[in-house]
Image (cartoon, helix red, strand yellow):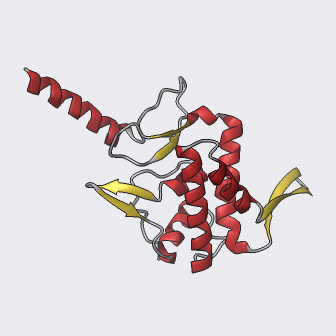
Amino acid sequence: MTVPDPRPLTGEPVSLDLLNTRWMHEGERQDLLTDPAGLAVWLAANGLDDRFTADGTTLRHALAARDALLGLVDRPGDPAAVERLDAILGHGRIRATLTADGPGERAEFRDPAWGPAWTAARNYLDLLRTAPDRIRGCAHEACILHFFDTSRNGTRRWCSMAICGNRAKASRHYARTKEN
């Protein structure tokens, strides 16, 4: 039986989705990755559950990747975070393949428990190659979620317009009415 994903924002690239395993709910920090069951939810949400096992070792590695990614998102280029992410990347590699469909690639790991952490770290590199300026944290002061801005003009500010964007609009409206 699959447990529903309780997070308010899902569907972001896997590296940012790993960051979004922490979120705020009614002023309290929530964390999906407190145990292997939460890891199983995250793996399923990212289509990784058929290749990797949700166990304590895989969870520890995923948490290490989340911490390294958070350090890089909060402080791009931070040497300590770069070193931590690079260490995670050292646990896997891309193997070039040729199939009936043509050239391809396949990720390989010395220890499969590193697979989800490595996959998230590798995805972050892809985002940096694509558009590093579109890796964002939500602009709402009480939100800790991250997203990859895919809007046409690159001006998305909120993790969700329905949640944080609406809160900001309501706050501005309240402030205007209070002044009058």
Residue 100 lies in quadrant? bottom right
Q: As rendered, which of 42 and 143 lies closer to the eye?
A: 143
The percent coordinates of residue 180 (x first, y second) are: 7, 20
Q: As rendered, which of 164 and 102 lies closer to the eye?
A: 164
Inspect this view and state whether residue 179 appears: yes
Q: Residue at x 52, y 76 (%)?
A: 36
Q: Is residue 79 left or right of residue 177?
A: right
The percent coordinates of residue 6 (x first, y second) are: 39, 62
Could you tell me how many numbered marks the image carries?
A: 0
Q: Residue at x 28, y 34 (%)?
A: 168
Q: Residue at x 52, y 64 (%)?
A: 42
Residue 102 vertical position relative to residue 6 in the rendered view, above or below: above
Inspect this view and state whether residue 55 appears: no
Residue 172 lies in quadrant? top left
Q: As rendered, which of 146 and 44 lies closer to the eye?
A: 146
In the picture as drawn, the residue positioned furthest to the bottom comes out as 56
The percent coordinates of residue 71 (x first, y second) are: 56, 51
In the picture as drawn, the residue positioned furthest to the front comes out as 79
